[in-house]
Image: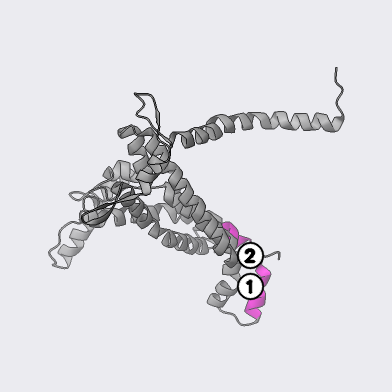
Amino acid sequence: MIKLKSSDKEAVAGYLFVLPNFIGFAVFTLVPVILSLVLSFVNWDMLSPPKMVGLANFINLVGFHKEAAGFVANDPLFWKCLGNTLYLMLIIPVEIMASLVLALVVNHRIRGINLFKTIYFLPTITNGVAICLLWAWIYNSDFGLLNSIIIKCANFLSIHAHGIPWLTSVEWAKPSLMMMGLWIMMGGYNMILFLAALQGVPRELYEAAEIDGAGSWEKFWSITWPMISPTTFFITVMAVIGGFQGGFMQAYIMTGGGPDRSTMTLEYLIYNHLYSWQHVGYAACIAWFVFMIVFLVTIFNWRFGGKLVQYSHY
């Protein structure tokens, strides 16, 4: 029987504690990721045997071919969905700024602030499907809350007005989803992270600035903003990653990807290719292309955005 030293026994015990998590990671994450990469090089409809096609899926996804009118994308729907995804991500800076403003508000010790925090955090812990159904009713063109308010205000001002087709017109569908996303995100985890960062700023810095005669804006710009810049950078990176991966649930429940596929995002496109059209290999190809976009954008953020972050060791 092999006798182990006490240090070796501790190492073995450590490995045994880690082993269940590693097995779970390998089975449910690592192996599926590797298999999806393999699938991106095949054509498979889940009914017939898969056929290896090499880089054909990737070439068809991002390639162009020449027609009489000029160069045309091999897969126009992919570029439309990529454009929709980037359009919806335009709300990210507004979401971050709104979260910061809310955090600045709740950072003050005023009467009823705990109730205010609870109200603004409720959307985060509410079921996403319930939120989508609620907003689908708010946006309803015939009996929705928003159009009712608009028409009543117009009647009060003696102005003839019609309800806005929030979710049924190409012009309004994406802005409608962006407004709902702003309502959900501004009081969620981003606000909590900003609040934690704000409460970590040393009071002595503000006291010294006040002695020097600094006003509220000077204190925010010279002390608060630099001190919370690591949190701002983290939230920005995570928001961009989430933006490329988001938009499915809202579009699936509220618009079905329409009208005219104007709310169909990359995530929704992957779902359709996989479950609606049984294009397993092509769906995996899109997923890996999205991964590469997110990876490059994240590297870009760390390479250039990281220079703006000030890490304080106060």
The answer to whether 182 appears left or right of 174 in the picture is right
Residue 251 on image: x %, y %: 32, 45
Residue 208 is a magenta residue:
yes
Question: Badge 1 is on which residue?
Answer: 206
Q: Quadrant of the C terminus?
A: bottom right
Badge 2 local density, few (<14 within 10 Å), some, or many (20+)? some
Along the polypeptide, which appears first: circle 1 or circle 2?
A: 2
Q: Is residue 129 magenta?
A: no
What residue lies at 43% left-to-right and 36% top-to-bottom? 41
With respect to residue 189, does 2 lie above or below?
above
- Residue 240 image position (x, y, % from top left): 47, 54
Range drawn in magenta: 195-211
- What is the chief secondary structure element of the magenta stretch? helix
Direction top: furthest residue: 1
SS at mark 2 in the image: loop
Q: Where is residue 104? Give x, y as percent.
A: 52, 64
